[in-house]
Amino acid sequence: MDPIRTCVGCRQRDSMQNLLRVVSLEGELQVDQQRKLPGRGAWIHGNCSQLALDRKGLVRALGDSKTESFETWLRNQAENMADKK
C-alpha cells in the first residue's frame, strides 16, 4: 500500500505516486523526484499549482512567504510538465 499525502493545492488525499514533492533548499524551490531531499516538503498534484497559489498552501506548508518566486516557479514547472506530455 502506497503512503497517502495531501495536495497543498486541492487538499485532496492521494498516493505519493500521483503527487510531486517540493522542498525549499537554501531559499530555492526544488522538485524532489527521488523523495529523499532533506528539509520540509510539500506535496502537490501537477495541475493544482494555481490552487496552491490562491490558497497559499505551498507558502504555508514550506514556512516561507516568497510568494512571487513561488508563483514564477510553479508556472515554470507547470509549463515543463505540459511540454513532457
Image: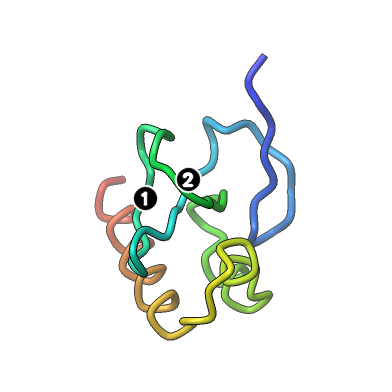
| Circles 2, 1 touching at the beta carbon (< 8 Å) | yes
**3D distance between C-alphas at marks 2 and 1:** 7 Å
Q: In this view, does 27 lie to the left or right of 5?
A: left
- Near-viewer residue (53 or 84): 53
Compared with 38, 9 (above or below) is: below
Quadrant of the rendered structure where residue 70 is?
A: bottom left
Kindly identify the residue that appears in the image at 37 percent across and 50 percent down: 31
Q: Which of marks 2 and 1 is nearer the N terminus?
A: 2
Q: Which amino acid does label 1 sit on?
A: Val
| Residue 64 in picture, x, y percent from top left | 53, 74
Q: How many marks?
A: 2
Where does the C terminus fall, quadrant-wise? top left
Secondary structure state at the residue bearing disc 2:
strand
Compared with 46, 68 (above or below) is: below
Q: Which mark is residue 31?
A: 1
Compared with 24, 41 (above or below) is: above
